[in-house]
Amino acid sequence: MTMKIIALASGGVDSSVMMLLLKKQGHVLFPLFLDYGQLSRKKEWIACQNICRHLDLDPYRMDVSGFGESIPSGITNSRLDIQKQAFLPTRNLLFLTLGAAYGYAKSISVTAIGLLSNPIFPDQTNEFIRATQKAISTSLGIDVEILTPSISLNKFDTLRLARKYKLPLDLTYSCHLGKQEPCGRCISCKERLVAEEYLSKGETT
């Protein structure tokens, strides 16, 4: 069944592959980019626009930058450690709440987020998704659905799918630091580097 879906889009590999998969299934996507005060927001927004253009989608940018600017985290404050202090409390809860609210205004009750199978933080688990879906549904008075199309995949899987379906990975951006060149130190960079190395080894064997 074709659905209208609010797709949380960051310009990274995971959300981009998620949108690719949902679109291939015939769903109608409304990409939502959230500027929550992250150091990488400028690069992410450019990547989000480029990927959405490739997928023939029109992203909407929502400014909630005060959130990240007020809460200590390495991904929002350059004075903190980009790796050791990467956790931003309730980030995904905020994402899904705003996605559902944005959808509510458009009479859309489904929101998709590109979580993977190897959660690092507590707001990346199936348990979190179930609890959040129930809370948002109660708060809105309607049945809200949260989709996690990539929850059974790891970073290697997403890269493999991107290559399989010719999604231009050079258009994506994954570094939390927000510099022109990936820092190689943040969690996002390390995950991608390991997955790319593993993928390249598989292609040569």
Image (tube, rainbow, N blue to C red):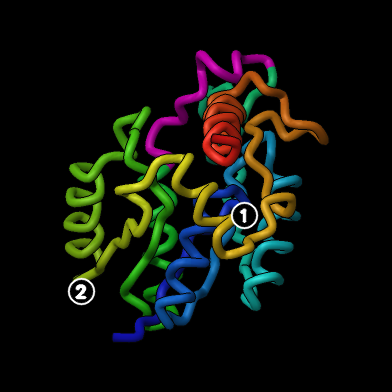
The residue stretch that appears in magenta: 79-91
Please give the residue where the numbered disc 1 appears in the rendered image. Answer: 63
In the rendered structure, the answer to whether residue 74 lies left or right of residue 18 reads right
Q: Is residue 186 magenta?
A: no
Which amino acid type is marked by label 1?
Asp
Please give the residue where the numbered disc 2 appears in the rendered image. Answer: 142
Q: Is residue 8 above or below residue 43?
A: below
Which amino acid type is marked by label 2?
Ile
Q: Position of residue 161 (x, y in %)?
A: 50, 56
| Image quarter of the N terminus | bottom left
Q: Position of residue 40 (x, y in %)?
A: 69, 38
Q: Main secondary structure of the magenta part?
A: loop
Where on the picture, by quarter, is residue 143?
bottom left
Q: Is residue 64 above or below residue 19?
A: above
Q: Is residue 79 above or below residue 177?
A: above
Q: Which secondary structure lies at badge 2?
A: loop
> What's the residue at 43%, 58% (across, down)?
98
Query: In this view of the protein, can residue 21 be seen by the observer?
Result: yes
| Image quarter of the C terminus | top right
Task: Give neighbour class at mark 1: few <14, some 14-19, many 20+ (Cα, 10 Å).
Answer: few
